[in-house]
Amino acid sequence: MKDFKYVITDPEGIHARPAGILVKTVKEFACDIKISKGGKAMNCKAIFGVMGLGAKKGDEVTLTFDGEDEEQAYEEVHKFMSENL
Amino acid sequence: MNVYEGKSVFHGIAIGRISIYKKGEQQVKRVKIDDAETEIARYEEAKIQAVKQLQGLYQKALREVGEANAAIFEVHQMMLEDDDYNDSIKNMVRTQEVNAEYAVASTSDNFAQMFAAMDDDYMKERAADVKDISERVLTVLHGGGGGAAAIKEPSIIVADDLAPSETVQLDKELVLSFVTVYGSLNSHTAILARTMAIPALVGTPLPLDDTIDGKLGIVDGVNGKIYVDPDESTLARLKKMQREDIQRKELLQTLKGKENITLDGKNVMLYANIGNIKDLAAVLQNDAGGIGLFRSEFIYLEKEDYPTEEEQFQIYKQAAETMAGRRVIIRTLDIGADKQCDYFGMEQEENPALGCRAIRICLTRPELFKTQLRALFRASAYGKIAIMYPMITSVKEVKRIQEIVSLVKAELTNQGIEFGEPEQGIMIETPAAVMVSEELAEEVDFFSIGTNDLTQYTLAIDRQNTKLDEFYDSHHPAVLRMISMVVQNAHKAGIWAGICGELGADQTLTQEFLAMGVDELSVSPGSILPIRKIVLETNVEEYKAGK
């Protein structure tokens, strides 16, 4: 299992559109991916869960990866987050 | 005639028939079913259909309103394919043995409530998205095709709220305006209206019944009103406003983005005068090259007590950041004469126009002045701020200002507070300043001529006194020669000179000012494009030769 923490810098936070793109990105991987904020963990492959976190600018979220392709997923998602959120 | 007020999303005037948009309300009954798997298969099929419809809408929206507005339909597809959403529906069908319609409607309510309860206005709006995608599935389950609204003539569309899938199916050519009872400035209708550049109101409490349906309506997006069944004088007044608005927008289209350059290649800066931070939108809309006069008085006049450094800093910073690198010339406090603040505790004066006003207050009360200067110097780190001092009559005054400025900078440095190096200029609005402009030009970075006061002081005529109209001449040669003299003295010292008084917007003088070599005209935002038009059509050398 791997994980990383990330502080949202996008002024809009993880709103509908970025949430959609994030979900699209993580769905490429087979491993189990969760996104959590303040102890609330959500399936990162489900858009309602991601949006339901209501992550705003300055909020810290944690992403965890568990499964066969976790290494690769970690790399890709980390890159995506720092470039887009 | 009835008038309703709402929040305006986009300026403009629309006149036309009102058409109430009626939703195909879905009645959902709870029905007990025998075979859960068949019911789930029904749902799956309906979902596939719904996703296909959304793909179609995405393509349509992409063509008509652009990628940014179309993206919502992609998000909608993902919502429909969301695991949690689908699990909830299937689970309900299996455990409660209910029909797919009921499971979809219940799940929709649950998810919508989750968003509605969130502490974020934008996310609250997403409750409408959940309902929208669920309605779509329900329509398919009911065997309907998801009908588009039946409008046949150009109309003002009125609804309690509009989902993105509803707005995108409307024939855009026939939509004059949107007016919704609910909805916020973040709603899709609002975003779409801005993209389509049509007037729209949200949060407008009007009755969706026969008292408005099919009636003539006027949407006044400038003042946030809709008139139903307007009387003749209102109709005539708004028609005139509409014509002016259209003309202005047409001018804007052709002139926006163009440089202010004459036929023979002379450049002039066209800046905007503003009296409040709220005017920034108008500045950008009218394509101003910068702000030539930011009247900082409003910060003082709107308050019951002296505004703090921090309050002022935030306002100046916002102006600097909004203008993104374009010059923002902020005039320091110009209180006195006709602008009074009770808490300043100024004494009654026999002759306030010639009394303790503007820079004279600042120099007699340096603490007050320093607060504003600190805010201005700090905000200068965030953009291209320039400071302008009003009512200057002598070099000595400028020297005293420079001393106070050095003190302020030293203080900020000692305190380790970040600040920028703004340009500093003065207003030329007294005959004395004109006469010593050659010396003043050596001390400052720019001149801006305040023609209102300069004319009043030069002609010794109170402009408020209408009995003196026959003696008043805004084009008096004395004033025009003074302007010319100031410009020449500025250029001799290698600095620029502009005009920020009302005369700057006088279109009959634009060519004359260009001939004098005036470098900048600062006018109300609405005057910028008409003046740009004159600049573009002028050949300065020919104009001079023809005089």
Image (spheres, rainbow, N blue to C red):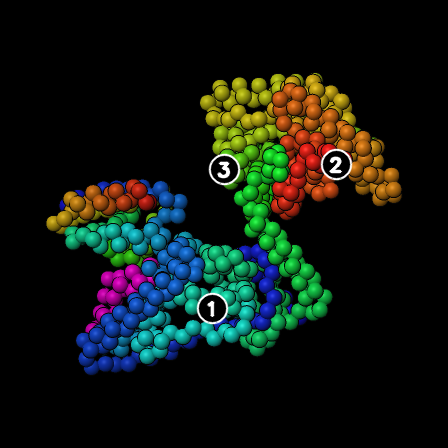
Crowdedness of circle 3 by 10 Å Cα count: few (<14), some, many (20+)? some
The quadrant in which residue B95 appears is: bottom left
Both labels 2 and 3 in a single chain: yes
N-terminal label among 3 and 1: 1
The residue at 49%/20% (across/down) is B413
Residue holding disc 2:
B546
Both labels 3 and 1 in a single chain: yes
Residue holding disc 3:
B324
Residue holding disc 1:
B171
Q: In this picture, is B361 found above or below A77?
A: above
| Quadrant placement of the N terminus of chain B | bottom right
Q: Position of residue B403 (x, y in %)?
A: 62, 18
Q: Between B16 and B456, which is closer to the camera in this rendering? A: B16
State yes or no: discs 2 and 1 in contact (Cβ < 8 Å).
Answer: no
Q: Position of residue B438 (x, y in %)?
A: 70, 20
Mark 3–mark 1 distance (CA, rounded to whole Å)? 37 Å
Q: Amino acid at mark 3?
A: Ala
Give the magenta range: B75-95
Q: Secondary structure at mark 1?
A: loop
N-terminal label among 2 and 3: 3
Q: Nearer the viewer, mark 2 or mark 3?
A: 2
Both labels 2 and 1 in a single chain: yes
